[in-house]
Amino acid sequence: MNRALCLLFALSLAPTLLVAQSKVDQAVQKAEEQLAKGKPEDAVKTMSKLVEQNPTSAEAYIAMASLQQRLGNFDEAAAVLAKAKDAVSGAGKAEVLGAIASLNLAAGRTRLGTRSRRPSWRQVRPPSPPWPGPRSGCRMPPPPS
């Protein structure tokens, strides 16, 4: 009985999820067409309307940020994703955090390849005690036989 109710509930939600996804896909396709026609302002308006209509959809925010990134507007893309981080919850938040990391890599906002503020291991490691080297007159004991 429980399985039947769960199945019925899942099937009742499926059209809603498919409609929401198709809205995102339709808006992205329309924005792509507008970009192809050389109208980036209209594409941004289309994606902005999508985000307004779906304020808790991670896909909508990520699509908007992706468009801004393609247009070279990294600051606007970062602002969209920052807003998404607060608006989205659950698994969608993980997608948004991944998009933020990708944007930071694309924009060169990482500390990879730069000097870190932490001291290197050479600065942290205590100096080693003087070791009597082979020329210091000390002999190593013979290996055990």
Image: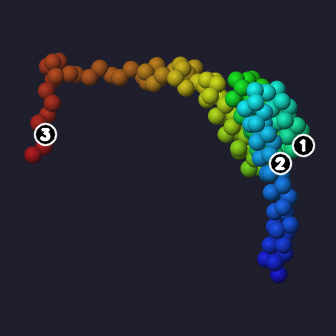
Whether residues under marks 1 and 2 lie with C-beta atoms below 8 angstroms apart, the answer is yes
- The residue sitting at 79% across, 51% down in the picture is 21
Name the residue furthest bottom: 1
User: x, y (%) of residue 56?
Assistant: 85, 45
Which one is in front in this view, the residue at disc 3 or the one at disc 2? 2
Where does label 1 land, which residue? 53
Where does label 3 land, which residue? 143
54 up-or-down from 68: above or below = below
85 up-or-down from 105: above or below = below
Whether residues under marks 3 and 1 lie with C-beta atoms below 8 angstroms apart, the answer is no
Q: Where on the picture, by quarter, is residue 45?
A: top right
Of residues 38 and 136, which is closer to you in this image? 38
Specify the label residue 23 is tagged with: 2
Q: Is residue 113 left or right of residue 52?
A: left
Mark 3 → mark 2, Cα distance in angstroms: 77 Å
Question: Dot 3 surroundings within 10 Å: few (below 14), some, or many (20 or more)?
Answer: few
Amino acid at circle 2: Lys
